Image (spheres, rainbow, N blue to C red):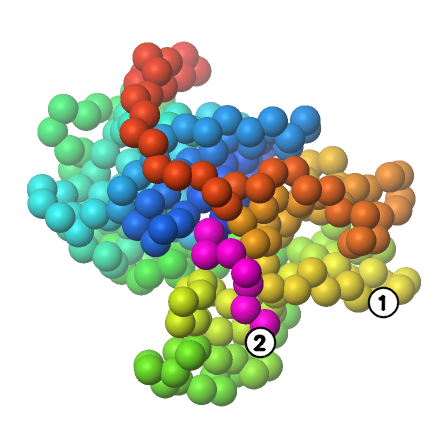
Amino acid sequence: MQRMKSHVRLYVILARRAPVGVVFRRGPTKQVLLIAWNTNDDTLESGQWLKGRIYERRCDLSPEGDLLLYFAASYRKPLYSWSAISRPPYLTALALWPKGDGWGGGGHFLSHTRIALNHRSSEMALGQGFSLPRRLAVQQFGDHPGWGEDDPIWSERLRRDGWILIDEGKLAKREWKAKVWIEFNPARRFRKPHPALPHRYALEMAILGLKEKDGPWYLTEHFIVRYKDATESIGRSDWADWSHSGDLLFAQDGCLFRVRRRGDVLASLDTKVKIADLSSLAFEAREAPEEARNWPAK
């Protein structure tokens, strides 16, 4: 398994109903920057950093992309960990639920007015000084709320957003002190058909293992499946998805890339365009503007 070059990790969540997304830019390990991404014109807006950990696979965007539900932890007093709603690309909480441990946390936007929070019953109270608008209803997530790690939030979000599990994978090795803690052979594989051309193209994600020493937690490769041609390997990469316009977007080595679709044809991987190199950014303390401190009007 070839290691990725950059120690910066990028993960993206795209909104379901709007051409916007949020980029979680992590590196060093306990420093995370939130970036807003307009996928129509590839403009990026840097927001706030957090000195701590954001569990990006337990997060979700509202359908229009104007609100972010995230799970974060400092593992220090007074909160240790918490779930919150903010206005991306800012992390300043509009609502906050103390959690206290690393189990569960985060959740899903079921709609613009309903969220499912992955907290136990004793953890459903809002933090002191926070309130919700009347239009927003909160319920618990799933059959065992407050437990699990990235799953079940991540796997359920993948399924909701069109990813299909095509191979459960098989545990091949589990050795804590090894270069890679857990390895799968064959890999655990998901496939997402192209939104406009599902019979011509698909995107595959292969999870090769977990916890690489001096590397990422999730060892993933992505592939472009061309049903009338050979499959192209993107290689080791943090994230990939289809844009609303049908372009391929992916993150690799601390950079964001795009492969364009023209009509019924998705260009080859060697035509990829680098949107941005985010590998050299450094922590900067930032205050949220007044607009990001208030709930959207609707």
| Residue drawn 85% across the image and 67% down it | 230
Question: What residue span does the magenta drawing correspond to?
Answer: 1-8
Q: How far apart are marks 2 and 1 (CA)?
A: 21 Å
Horizontally, residue 276 falls left or right of residue 47, namely right
| Amino acid beneath label 2 | Met
| Amino acid beneath label 1 | Ala
Q: Name the residue under label 1.
A: 230
Horizontally, residue 5 falls left or right of residue 297, namely right
* Of marks 2 and 1, the one in the foreground: 2
Is 249 rendered above or below residue 191? Answer: above
Q: Mark 2 points at which residue?
A: 1
Q: Residues within 10 Å of mark 2 (few under 14, many from 20)?
A: few
Magenta span contains residue 4? yes
Horizontally, residue 158 falls left or right of residue 226, namely left
| Residue 86 pos. (x, y %) | 35, 29
Magenta span contains residue 289? no
| Residue 50 pos. (x, y %) | 30, 39
Image quadrant occupied by the N terminus = bottom right
